[in-house]
């Protein structure tokens, strides 16, 4: 099965019942599978007029109560930023798949890239929470798509699945679970319309979300708003909102996904994600075969960045090699956490994969 | 005339004499406003947008709809602030995108009456693409466009409906761009109900909005209004009352227009008020619903995509 197909299957398994999107290589297979499969299970698919509209439509669908998703690549992701910010502001659960391709601009439509790491974090204006997950295999594309929906619903937040062209178009054997057995998280609901506050300042920071048309008439806006949802300019309403929403993902350990393959006594570690992590694993094997001690840290949750785990890794090694298919984006985060002198960047931003040799050479330098 | 229009100050002055609760009891319109939202509105005294809000509430009331079954989706601008005051499901979105949000909501909740409330800049400049495609799909949304021919909230820049040669802060020498005819555009793009009136004629707006909401497919109602604060001031068109009166004098009913001779119709520069276009065409969510029924027996087939 192909990575993009696995993403679509993951969405269906997670309970996605609405897809709105606009065709763009290398993500289009996600839309094609959703167009074919969604109506079979009573779901809805629509091809919108552009990516701005696609993002808007899935927010509308989510407000109507459907688990909703769109898929795109860099140029479309740029267009979606406006309404990703809206989803963050209004706390609307939704999943945005970005199968990254080489940019900037139209770039190289069939070439792979990891160039949207920072855009996923800071692409829309203003401070806001976001979750971004990056799969390293076709099987993980399925698993992380399910996870993306569950996190979106649990935390009332947009979640970005930051795949890349290599994972999206790669074919690998996958054993899909029975969809009924897949763990599905549903959004928190409430049963008292009269006392309902859609943006209540609750402990944990995630208020219940009522669907339109179910007896809860409330206001949703991209303006700063009070607990009921009405626009406000009062600092005693804005400040608690800022604190609640920007902190609701900070202490949630179930969001932070990573894999550690540590070797005792290793003075070098490789930290990577997505397609580059596959190369990193290969390089690690080569280095270990030569008798060198090397640890491997594979990041699935790009945002929020797993600081504590990376800090711990930094304390145990002399240097961390960060291979990525861009000119150094996640490396900035690693440098922030462990210090600049400990980080060795291995970059390639011309559409070609990083080779194991490049990482081995960095390790042996 | 100007003195007869209550300003925010007038309401404040009367506050002790007319308890606010009694207003709500006395008026069906007021009963559908949000009692927990602080009034007055953000609109300037004398603005026409409030007239449209009253019409919209009366139209919904006249159809006997449950408030829970009505969703108001708005973009950005003076007009787009309307839903926050109204006691329905209300979604205040991003600039130009109201119809795209409304499309997703209508697909998720086809049983709901979804009304997209936009100004002329919102609907036709930044939102022009969504406008024509929503009309093309004939999705069951009512597009209510309040046309005041200016960007009011940002202080009076020219919009896609500003008439030629009229001034705006970004057209200081007169507008050099021809305006969009909103209703023609909507009809050409595929809307199945198109009507227009002005804020001088709220009873007409009541009727057209009720018909638009009843129409199964995509409906468009253009409510011609004015902005005395920006457009009126820079073009020396007088007070709100003067501009309101001008809507009466510079408009003509469609039935009167239809009685004109061909030459007179060609030379007409007045706003034509009436139901301008209707068409029978299947509605989008209904069509998709039949598709779902047709394929719902088929199983999802992972193996179709390369299998396990």
Image (tube, coloured by chain):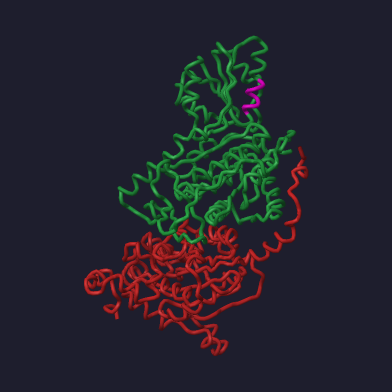
- Report whether B10 appears left or right of A34: left
- Seen from the viewer's position, the closer of residues B84 and A363 is B84
Q: Is residue B17 above or below residue B293?
A: below
Is residue A12 magenta-colored? no
- Report whether A293 appears left or right of B199: right
Q: Is residue A202 above or below residue A251?
A: below
Q: Is residue B171 visible?
A: no
Chain red in the figure, letter? B
Q: Residue at x 64, y 45 (%)?
A: A11
Q: Is residue B270 above or below residue B133?
A: below
Residue A337 at x, y = what percent?
45, 25
Chain green in the figure, letter? A
Q: Residue at x 71, y 54 (%)?
A: A40
Magenta region? A276-282
| Most common secondary structure along the magenta stretch | helix
Residue B30 quadrant: bottom left
């Amino acid at each position: 099965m192909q990575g993009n197909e696995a993403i679509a299957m993951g969405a269906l398994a997670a309970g996605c019942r609405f897809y709105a999107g606009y065709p763009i290589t290398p993500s289009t297979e996600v839309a094609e599978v959703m167009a074919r499969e969604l109506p079979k299970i009573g779901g809805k698919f629509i091809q919108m007029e552009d990516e701005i509209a696609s993002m808007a439509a899935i927010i509308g669908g989510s407000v109507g109560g459907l688990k909703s998703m769109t898929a795109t690549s860099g140029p479309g992701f740029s267009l979606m930023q406006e309404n990703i910010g809206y989803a963050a502001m209004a706390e609307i659960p939704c999943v945005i798949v970005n199968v990254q391709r080489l940019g900037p601009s139209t770039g190289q439509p069939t070439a792979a890239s990891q160039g949207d790491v920072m855009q996923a974090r800071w692409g829309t204006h203003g401070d806001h929470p976001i979750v971004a997950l990056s799969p390293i295999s076709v099987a993980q594309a399925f698993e992380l798509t399910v996870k993306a929906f569950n996190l979106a619903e649990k935390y009332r937040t947009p979640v970005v699945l930051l795949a890349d062209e290599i994972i999206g178009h790669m074919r690998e054997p996958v054993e899909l679970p029975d969809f009924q057995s897949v763990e599905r998280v549903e959004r928190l609901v409430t049963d008292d319309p009269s006392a309902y506050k859609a943006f209540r300042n609750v402990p944990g920071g995630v208020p219940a979300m009522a669907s339109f048309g179910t007896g809860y008439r409330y206001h949703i806006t991209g303006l700063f708003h009070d607990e009921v949802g009405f626009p406000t300019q009062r600092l005693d309403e804005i400040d608690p909102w800022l604190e609640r929403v920007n902190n609701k993902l900070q202490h949630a350990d179930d969001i932070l996904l990573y894999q550690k393959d540590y070797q005792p006594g290793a003075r070098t570690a490789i930290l990577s994600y997505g397609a580059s992590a596959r190369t990193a694993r290969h390089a690690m094997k080569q280095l270990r075969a030569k008798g060198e001690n090397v640890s491997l840290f594979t990041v699935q949750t790009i945002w929020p960045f797993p600081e504590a785990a990376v800090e711990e890794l930094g304390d145990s090694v002399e240097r961390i090699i960060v291979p990525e298919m861009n000119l150094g984006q996640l490396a900035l985060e690693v440098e922030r956490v462990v210090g600049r002198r400990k980080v060795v960047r291995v970059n390639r931003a011309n559409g070609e994969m990083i080779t194991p040799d490049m990482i081995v050479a960095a390790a042996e330098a | 005339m100007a003195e007869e229009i209550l300003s925010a100050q007038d309401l404040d002055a009367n506050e002790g004499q007319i308890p606010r609760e009694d207003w709500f009891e006395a008026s069906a319109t007021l009963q559908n406003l949000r009692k927990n939202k602080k009034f007055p509105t953000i609109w300037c005294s004398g603005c026409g947008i409030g007239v449209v809000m009253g019409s919209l509430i009366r139209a919904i009331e006249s159809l006997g709809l449950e408030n829970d079954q009505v969703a108001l989706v708005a973009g950005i601008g003076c007009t787009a602030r309307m839903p926050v005051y109204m006691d329905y499901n209300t979604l205040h979105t991003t600039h130009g995108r109201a119809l795209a949000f409304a499309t997703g909501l209508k697909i998720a909740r086809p049983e709901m009456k979804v009304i997209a409330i936009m100004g002329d800049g919102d609907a036709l400049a930044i939102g022009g693409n969504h406008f024509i495609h929503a009309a093309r799909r004939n999705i069951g949304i009512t597009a209510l466009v309040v046309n005041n021919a200016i960007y009011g909230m940002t202080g009076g820049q020219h919009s896609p409906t500003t008439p030629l040669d009229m001034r705006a802060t970004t057209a200081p020498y007169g507008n050099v761009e021809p305006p969009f005819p909103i209703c023609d555009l909507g009809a050409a793009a595929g809307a199945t109900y198109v009507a227009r009136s002005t804020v001088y004629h709220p009873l007409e707006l009541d009727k057209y909005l009720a018909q638009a909401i009843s129409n199964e497919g995509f409906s468009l109602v253009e409510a011609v209004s004015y902005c005395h604060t920006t457009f009126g001031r820079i073009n020396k068109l007088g007070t709100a009352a003067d501009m309101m009166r001008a809507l009466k004098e510079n408009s003509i009913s469609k039935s009167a227009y239809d009685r004109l001779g061909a030459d007179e119709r060609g030379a007409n520069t007045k706003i034509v008020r009436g139901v301008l276009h209707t068409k029978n065409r299947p509605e989008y969510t209904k069509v998709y619903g039949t598709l779902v029924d047709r394929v719902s027996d088929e199983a999802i087939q992972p193996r179709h995509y390369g299998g396990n």
